[in-house]
Amino acid sequence: MNPLLKSYNTAPFSEIENKHFLPAIKQLIAETKAEIDAITENSDAPTFENTLEALENTGEKLDRATSIFFNLNSAETNDEIQKIAQEISPMLTEFSNDLLLNEALFERVKNVYQQKDSLNLNAEQQMLLTKKYKSFARNGANLSEEKKSELRKIDTQLSKLSLTFGENVLAETNRFELHITDEKDLSGLPEGTIEAAAQTASEKGKDGWVFTLDYPSYVPFMTYADNRELRKKMAIAFGAKGFHNDKLDNQNNVLQISKLRHKRANLLGYDSHANFVLEERMAETPEKVKSFLYELLAKAKPAAQKEFERLTAFAKDLDNIDRLEKWDDAYYSEKLKQKLFNLDDEKLKPYFELKNVIQGVFTVAEKLYGLHFEEVQNIDKYHADVKTYEVKDDEGELVAIFYADFHPRPGKRNGAWMTSYKPQQIKNGKNERPHISIVCNFTKPTSSKPSLLTFNEVTTLFHEFGHALHGILANTHYPSLSGTSVYWDFVELPSQILENWCYEKETLELFATHYKTGELIPMEYVEKIKESATFLEGMATLRQLSFGMLDMAWHGGDPSHVNNVKSFEIAAFEDTQLYPDVKENCMSTSFSHIFQGGYSAGYYSYKWAEVLDADAFALFKQEGIFNKKVADKFKGFVLSQGGTMDPMELYKQFRGQEPDPEALLKRAGLLT
């Protein structure tokens, strides 16, 4: 029998073959449609229970099967899975449209919604009712038949285009390699990076050293390689993904996606895709987002320009470089950082062995929230690299199942993310606990060294683990309001706040010990980590703002006049540009966050959530970073509540006030 059609608790990865996905998902769509028909054909008057709760309980098996499929398509894909995705995505889009454009179902939901004030619903029930009603209204339920048909067509096209976009980026990442055979071209590179490149070459059946566009290979090369021409070659390859006018080119996909999103928004009565998206965000409108970004720009730009001038003068003094280029950024920033702080990743990496950092983040979760992680071998996994854990509370009760997948592979997209295989919900009096996963791309162990992380990778692990805690500690009745099912400019708060612990002496003492000697990280290094936390922060802020502005340029207006992706992008970057443009490069064609992930008209949310996290962490700093009272409040009002209340209300219940933007500017050293 098809394993995806059986009842299962943890995902039965070892039983699933690619051939199972399509028939299972077809059957589960049919079963879910039957569940929906049972709601619409119910002759009883619509009530919250027989309509809203019944709707919330439809499609559980379908949701689980699709989450397994799409997680594999990101973390362990191949040509066959990508081909299946091109069939499955339009089917799911059509099904989603069938649901949201189902008149009989909408009538029942609307009927209950109109009585909402007299139904005596609790806050969570009210939120479920409002969200379900709005999801119909916002996705075409009130449109004419002709416009509904147009909406379906647009949604099907969009689902295919974003899949193709992602496949092209992955194929571009995989097809480039820098093959070095002359040892002098390795000058400046750390021993561990060289060893990893030799291992990659050997795996590919080549002599010498191979560097790729995977982050653990690309980032150290750009940071340490003395050979400027080779850095240029790598940087151009990295920045030209999807921009080669060949079969993997994404320019047309970018234009089509942005234009179709705009057309869809207009069809639904919104001025732009950003207007549509932001109606369901804390920021509310594109004007508010733009004003937020420009307010930060006004603070960050003078600092960034000063930093850039300093970096330029430093490179001129050191190597007689007349003009800094993008491929010089990481290299000279690192050199200047070493000069100012006598601190570099190579000094720090021996203290950040991956297994110790994992244990460290687990200890932080235990001290704050009473969680205990125990690695187990009896849970199915999709790859040998994946680690599986049972998460229990102080009483020994199961809180969650946790998966962690840490190293790059050819079938895995770049970056880091958190996802879920089973949502938390309280159903029939039973609290069903979630199955949560994080996926990262950290340096692999070599024959002579374990996986040693850069400090940046340490903060990435804490970031994704913060998202995981949001899922693990979820405690709501309805899965669609559970865990990370919150406004996207609120979802980064739990992840970004946890990064703050990485800079604290009390935290580093828990796990930062030398992988060979067991010696604790020297306190002078801890001080330097803290001191260097705001190093070139103006330039880093400007970079983040530039991404948010590019996103708003594509989605905050009418892109129908745009026919050249590159020149449109240059105009969007005008206010934030420090380095000269590289004509061979284009960011939009590989900007997966907004053209494949869920961040369209939402990239600003990283900065938005930084304001929240700086303000929230200020309370922990004031009371003690492991203060149980503050941790209980954060767990009670933020981590466990999911999307059951307006996020600003949740934040104010935790903090006692609205967030103060000064906290971020102060932490970033941008207050004059």
Image (cartoon, rainbow, N blue to C red):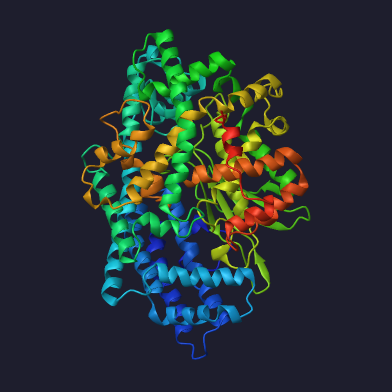
Q: Quadrant of residue 473?
A: bottom right
Name above or below for residue 204 compared with residue 556. above
Name the side, left or right, on which 411 lies relative to 154.
right
Q: Is residue 187 left or right of residue 639?
A: left
Q: Give the farthest residue toward the bottom.
A: 43
Q: In front here: 189 or 463?
A: 463
Q: Using the image, determine if residue 546 lies above or below residue 27.
A: above
Q: Position of residue 38 (x, y in %)?
A: 47, 83
Image height of 283 relative to 38, above or below: above
Query: In the image, 295: left or right of 87?
Result: right
Q: Nearer the viewer, residue 617 or 363?
A: 617
Residue at 44% x, 20% y: name it: 331
Please say whether residue 165 is visible from this viewpoint.
yes
Evaluate whether residue 224 shows in this view: no
Tell me what residue is drawn at x 38 percent, y 60 percent: 19
State the count of labels: 0
Q: Nearer the viewer, residue 407 or 585?
A: 585
The spot of residue 150 in percent (x, y) is: 27, 68
For this rendering, which residue is in front, 498 or 304? 304
Q: Quadrant of the C terminus?
A: top right
Residue 621 shown left or right of residue 138 in the figure = right
